[in-house]
Amino acid sequence: MTEAAVVAKGKVYEFTTHSGTETVGIGRKLAGLLAPPQLLILRGDLGTGKTTLVKGIAQALEAAEPDEVTSPTFTLLHEFDGEREGQPIKLYHLDVYRLESERQLETLGIDDLLGDDALVLVEWGEKFKSIVKRATGEIAITATGGNARKIAVTLKS
Ligand SMILES: Nc1ncnc2c1ncn2[C@@H]1O[C@H](COP(=O)(O)OP(=O)(O)O)[C@@H](O)[C@H]1O
Ligand SMILES: [Mg+2]
């Protein structure tokens, strides 16, 4: 698969990985391909590697060392300053697993995050209609046995 193919709109592209390190590598690759602004839902059961993928994206954008990217399950939102093709980029990493209502979600102000230079990655974003509606795509991770993961990237626009 060529890298250009990965960003084609309205299609699903799949990768398979066999370790966290490999998933970080896919994240690094995706970082170069996802032109902001993007609001992407990260789907997948607990422990499938959503946060791990964000580590790779953050690393490639020189926004954070992998160690600095942790699950925002309790803090809800982590913000990083990065760079892509010489342009500043804002990386927002959210985890809305613990949020229970659209009302609670509103306090996060996701709409305000999606500026021109923003890459907004939302773990469990599929829980909320308002996020699904605004999403520019999704990355779905499925455990397929042992450490194997299928990573499917779909961009709407
Ligand atoms: N192929 C893989 N891709 C991603 N993570 C993997 C893989 N194989 C094993 N792991 C491990 O699974 C865990 C995924 O954790 P994490 O990224 O926090 O998941 P999530 O954010 O989806 O809950 C990590 O401990 C990671 O090392
Ligand atoms: Mg996580």
Image: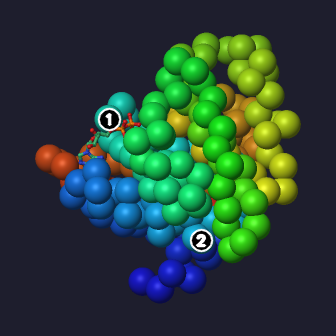
Identify the residue at horizontal 38%, vertical 63% (top origin). Answer: 25
Q: Nearer the viewer, residue 41 or 156?
A: 41
Identify the residue at horizontal 57%, vertical 58% (top origin). Answer: 62
Residue 2 makes an appearance in the image: yes
Q: Is residue 110 above or below residue 43?
A: above
x then y, percent, for residue 126: 58, 36
- Compared across the picture, whether 14 is left or right of 128 comes to left
Identify the residue at horizontal 52%, vertical 63% (top origin). Answer: 60
Counting residues from the N terminus, which is met first, the one under dot 1 or under dot 2? Answer: 2
Q: Amino acid at mark 2?
A: Leu
Residue under pointer 1: 47
Residue under pointer 2: 33
Q: Residue furthest bottom?
A: 2
Element marked by disc 2 = helix
Figure quadrant of the C terminus:
bottom right
Q: Quadrant of residue 152?
A: bottom left
Establish whether ligand 1 lies closer than 8 Å to the Cβ of label 1: yes
